[in-house]
């Protein structure tokens, strides 16, 4: 398996509502849905955001399901997909597996946290949290996701480390470490982002890098 990709940092559609910086480029979702699922398969994104995983999945004839915390984003995603009832508003930490079919793949990108931040990413940076609590919450979400997955299915997490004011938060590595408690870790794919519109600015992607990781896991047998 090739463990690096070079992709253009681009989105198929410009959205009326949207913070492009947090959107996953379609090409990355497409790459992993093609690698790890088939037409007709159910696909889950517990942090649906503006709906990239769901819209790409539909384009590839998969059947997407999503959870998103922000009601405004939920309405937005519902307007972009064929089955709006598959898009649930809620907290992924409380995801109810009985509300979903068995999924062949989970492709997602969680809200990010810098290690000195004390705002809670799981409440869209309202409320308080800590980096250790954040990692506990990540593990909680994916333990729930695990219960929605069919045997031998795949989980792909799009995440990067973060460079902020000269400090590095090893977010990708810390998430990989925590999720290896839930799934078998198959390894990382390094994704180099080419952004033709970006200025020569190290903060061009908000997190301080021009690469990210697709962390790939497999469901373990019970
Ligand atoms: C990195 S963004 C995902 C972007 C998405 N991949 C896209 O392309 O639009 C993370 C999303 O997680 C959502 N989120 C934050 N806390 C959440 C929670 N507790 N439960 C579900 N979603 C949550 C945020 O509102 C945000 O939209």
Image (cartoon, helix red, strand yellow):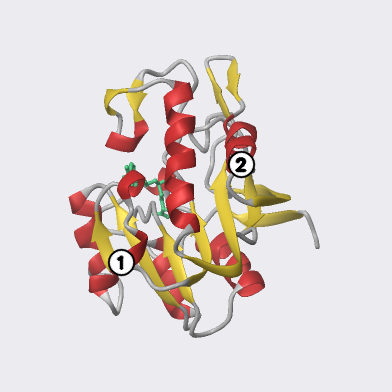
As helix, strand or loop, the secondary structure at mark 1 comes to helix
- At horizontal 19% and vertical 52% (from top left) the residue drawn is 72
- At horizontal 60% and vertical 21% (from top left) the residue drawn is 168
Q: Quadrant of residue 100?
A: bottom left
Indicate whether 48 appears above or below 57. Answer: above
On the image, numbered disc 1 is attached to which residue? 99
Query: Can residue 2 be seen by looking at this rendering?
Result: yes
Q: Is mark 2 within 8 Å of ligand 1?
A: no
Indicate whether 177 appears above or below 40. Answer: above
As helix, strand or loop, the secondary structure at mark 2 comes to loop
Q: Residue furthest front?
A: 222
Along the line of sight, which residue is nearer the eye, 178 or 15?
Answer: 178
Indicate whether 5 appears above or below 124. Answer: below
Q: Quadrant of residue 134?
A: top left
Q: Residues within 10 Å of mark 2 (few under 14, many from 20)?
A: few
- At horizontal 23% and vertical 72% (from top left) the residue drawn is 85
Q: Position of residue 76 (x, y in %)?
A: 23, 61
> Where the N terminus falls, by quadrant?
bottom right
Label at residue 181: 2
> Where the C terminus falls, by quadrant?
bottom right
Along the line of sight, which residue is nearer the eye, 187 or 5?
Answer: 187
| Earlier residue among tags 1 and 2 | 1
């Amino acid at each position: 398996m090739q463990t690096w990709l070079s992709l253009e940092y681009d989105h198929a559609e410009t959205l009326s509502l949207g913070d492009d910086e947090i959107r996953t480029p379609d090409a990355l979702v497409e790459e992993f849905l093609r690698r790890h699922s088939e037409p007709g398969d159910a696909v889950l994104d517990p942090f649906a955001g503006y709906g990239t995983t769901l819209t790409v999945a539909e384009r590839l004839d998969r059947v997407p399901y999503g959870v998103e915390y922000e009601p405004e984003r939920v309405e937005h995603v519902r307007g972009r997909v064929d089955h709006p009832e598959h898009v649930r508003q809620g907290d992924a930490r409380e995801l109810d597996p009985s509300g979903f079919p068995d999924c062949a793949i989970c492709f997602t990108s969680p809200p990010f946290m810098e290690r000195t931040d004390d705002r809670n990413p799981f409440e869209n940076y309202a409320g308080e949290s800590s980096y250790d609590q954040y990692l506990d919450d990540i593990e909680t979400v994916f333990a729930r996701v695990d219960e929605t997955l069919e045997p031998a299915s795949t989980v792909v997490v799009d995440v990067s480390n973060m460079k902020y004011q000269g400090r590095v938060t090893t977010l990708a590595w810390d998430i990989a470490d925590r999720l290896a408690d839930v799934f078998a870790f198959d390894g990382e794919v390094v994704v180099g982002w080419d952004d033709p519109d970006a200025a020569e600015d190290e903060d061009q992607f908000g997190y301080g890098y021009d690469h990210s990781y697709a962390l790939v896991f497999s469901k373990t047998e019970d």
